[in-house]
Image: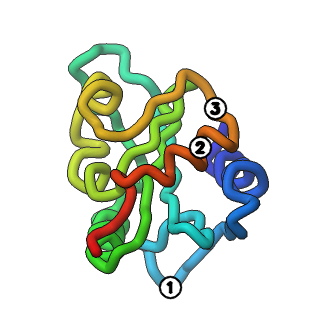
Amino acid sequence: MSESTMRQWVTQTALREWGALAIENLLSKGTPDVFCTRGAVELKEAAVPKRAETVVRVRHFSPEQRSTLVGMHARGWRLAVVLRLGRSWIMLPALWAAEYLGRVPAWVLVQASPGRVWSRRPSGESFREEFLREVYRGAS
């Protein structure tokens, strides 16, 4: 499943009832992939490393994206970064992801993050319920 397929599922299934829109913004490299009435989601994918201590390499997670997530969080946005790691889906609080994603091994993403891990693509309901948890809410 590609990032564009993930985006299609998130906008048309998981967050559809919240008016989800996929954003392709060529003017700003940091804009999250999906916006909805409840917040925004950045989508990423990566292969599972062969060795447990190998850092998960996330392509295209730019300094501009990290900075945008930090800034939006400071302004009170509800934000998540959703990583498809092999077959697993991991929803990470954006502030945590901005600091650690692409810099830590898979076991840290699974065991130490305050987010949620699904062994396969979650149901739309499970995705929405997780996104509403307080851990994804920006600063007030």
List x then y, in percent, for residue 26.
55, 79
Indicate the quadrant where residue 25 lies.
bottom right
Residue drawn at x 45%, y 80% as measured from the top left: 28
Residue designated by label 1: 27
User: Foreground: 83 or 91?
Assistant: 91
Mark 2 or 3 closer to N-term?
A: 3
Q: Would residue 9 be found to the left or right of residue 70 on screen?
A: right
List x then y, in percent, for residue 79.
43, 62
Does 130 appear above or below 48? below
Crowding around mark 1 (Cα neighbors within 10 Å: few <14, some 14 to 19, many 20+) is few
Number of the label disc, if any, that sits on residue 121 = 3
Crowding around mark 3 (Cα neighbors within 10 Å: few <14, some 14 to 19, many 20+) is some
Measured Cα–Cα span from mark 2 to mark 1: 29 Å
User: Foreground: 65 or 95?
Assistant: 95
Residue drawn at x 23%, y 35% as measured from the top left: 104
Viewer-side label of 2, 3: 2
Q: What colouring style does the render use? A: rainbow
Viewer-side label of 2, 1: 2
Number of the label disc, if any, that sits on residue 127 = 2
Q: What element carries label 1?
A: loop
